[in-house]
């Protein structure tokens, strides 16, 4: 009797080990080019159901997956992320993939002045992010969950160099960029903005206009002064970047017809700032928007050398425009 109990004590654990090994090596259907997005708060059942609905899991696969997650005590260790399942051949490989912080680290730099579409395109090319899903998330009300009252995330994806994992999904990247913006804003902008009675959206919107106008950081505070002066006088901003924002096809030379486009972002037709930012501005542009240079300037025009000519009166401005046109013609002839 004792011998039989001894044999059972050896045999049962051995049988469980074999059973566990069989489950790990349980083959699943090839999932070439299949990607699964595991959102925050996902459970074993929700992951299994997602794969079942995509017709890559059979009912037996679902059972085996749930059982191995339970036996391996990994039910609460599922990582949020976006996973490529192309190389997964069995249940063990799937479990290992979604319960480890997998993915290759990649460094990406986002340039100040880029818009949502530029971000989405770079993320798609670099790590396979769904650009349409990313853009839709940015244009949704999700930005308000950060306490930001803005029409979209445009302006709040801080341009910087980031280390991302290739397994990151759209929401993880979005959260990282917005939190980086909030960190910069709270440390460098908030106190001064509140002291001059500018809301966060006003600061970022003006900064995006300054970013769109300034080819040189050294001119940002002077450009900001022009817009502050115009706002204080109740004049239309007449900011070209606001027109570039509403015309399709990217930046080009504007026409008089463009200036008549009916849009709340058209600062030639509407007074005050537009509803929201036009791009994602740098810290320099954000600083300039709350620290305008003291000046009497109300106008500026490009000087064809990457800078601008500033003027106090409309008469001076028209004179500078004539200078600009002559310089531009000479350059075009060369």
Image: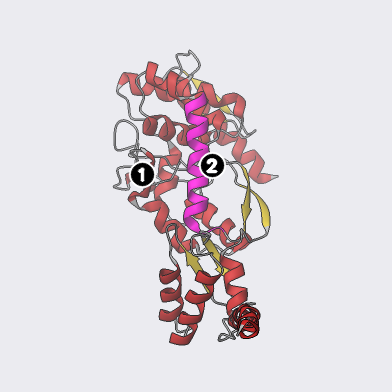
Q: Which residue is mark 2?
A: 113
Where is residue 241 drawn, in percent x and y?
Answer: 45, 40
Q: Position of residue 70 (x, y in %)?
A: 50, 70
Point out the stretch of residues depicted in magenta: 168-187
User: Where is residue 277 shown, x and y percent of the image?
Assistant: 41, 40
Residue toward you, 138 or 252: 138
Of label 1 and label 2, which has the lower sequence position?
Answer: 2
Question: Camera-side residue: 4 or 50?
Answer: 4
Q: Position of residue 177 (x, y in %)?
A: 52, 44
Q: Is residue 228 above or below residue 129?
A: above
Is the magenta region chiefly helix, strand or loop?
A: helix
**Tag 2: Cα neighbours inside 10 Å, few (<14), some, or many (≥20)?**
many
Residue 34 located left or right of residue 255? right
Q: How many residues crowd around disc 1 within 10 Å: few (fewer than 14), some, or many (20 or more)?
A: few
In front: 62, or 17? 17
Please say whether residue 110 is visible from this viewpoint. Answer: yes
| Residue at x 39% of width, y 19% of height | 229
Give the position of the C terminus as an image quadrant: top right
Q: Residue under circle 1?
A: 145
Q: Quadrant of residue 14?
A: bottom right
Mark 1 and mark 2: Cα distance apart in space:
24 Å
Q: Quadrant of the N terminus?
A: bottom right
Q: SS for tag 1?
A: helix
Instruction: Describe the element under mark 2 as helix, strand or loop.
Output: loop
């Amino acid at each position: 009797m004792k011998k039989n109990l001894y044999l059972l004590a050896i045999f049962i654990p051995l049988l469980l080990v074999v059973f566990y090994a069989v489950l790990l090596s349980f083959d699943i259907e090839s999932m070439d080019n299949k990607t699964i997005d595991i959102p925050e708060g996902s459970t074993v059942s929700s992951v299994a159901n997602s794969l079942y609905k995509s017709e890559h899991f059979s009912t037996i696969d679902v059972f085996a997956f749930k059982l191995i997650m339970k036996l391996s005590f990994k039910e609460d260790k599922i990582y949020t992320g976006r996973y490529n399942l192309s190389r997964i051949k069995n249940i063990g490989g799937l479990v290992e993939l979604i319960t480890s912080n997998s993915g290759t680290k990649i460094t990406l730099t986002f340039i100040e002045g880029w818009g949502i579409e530029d971000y989405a395109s770079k993320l798609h090319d670099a790590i396979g992010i769904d650009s349409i899903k990313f853009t839709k998330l940015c244009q949704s009300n999700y930005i308000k969950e950060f306490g930001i009252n803005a029409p979209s995330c445009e302006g709040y994806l801080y341009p910087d160099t980031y280390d991302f994992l290739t397994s990151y999904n759209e929401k993880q990247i979005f959260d990282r960029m917005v939190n980086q913006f909030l960190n910069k804003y709270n440390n460098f902008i908030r106190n001064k903005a509140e002291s001059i009675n500018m809301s966060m959206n006003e600061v970022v919107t003006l900064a995006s206009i300054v970013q769109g106008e300034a080819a040189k950081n050294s001119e940002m505070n002077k450009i900001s002064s022009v817009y502050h002066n115009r706002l204080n006088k109740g004049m239309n901003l007449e900011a070209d970047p606001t027109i570039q924002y509403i015309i399709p096809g990217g930046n080009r030379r504007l026409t008089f017809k463009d200036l008549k486009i009916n849009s709340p972002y058209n600062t030639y037709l509407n007074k005050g700032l537009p509803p929201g930012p036009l791009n994602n501005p740098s810290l320099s542009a954000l600083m300039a928007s709350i620290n305008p240079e003291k000046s009497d300037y109300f106008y500026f025009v490009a000087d064809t050398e990457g800078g601008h000519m500033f003027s106090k009166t409309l008469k001076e401005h028209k004179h500078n425009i004539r200078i600009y046109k002559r310089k531009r013609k000479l350059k075009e002839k060369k």
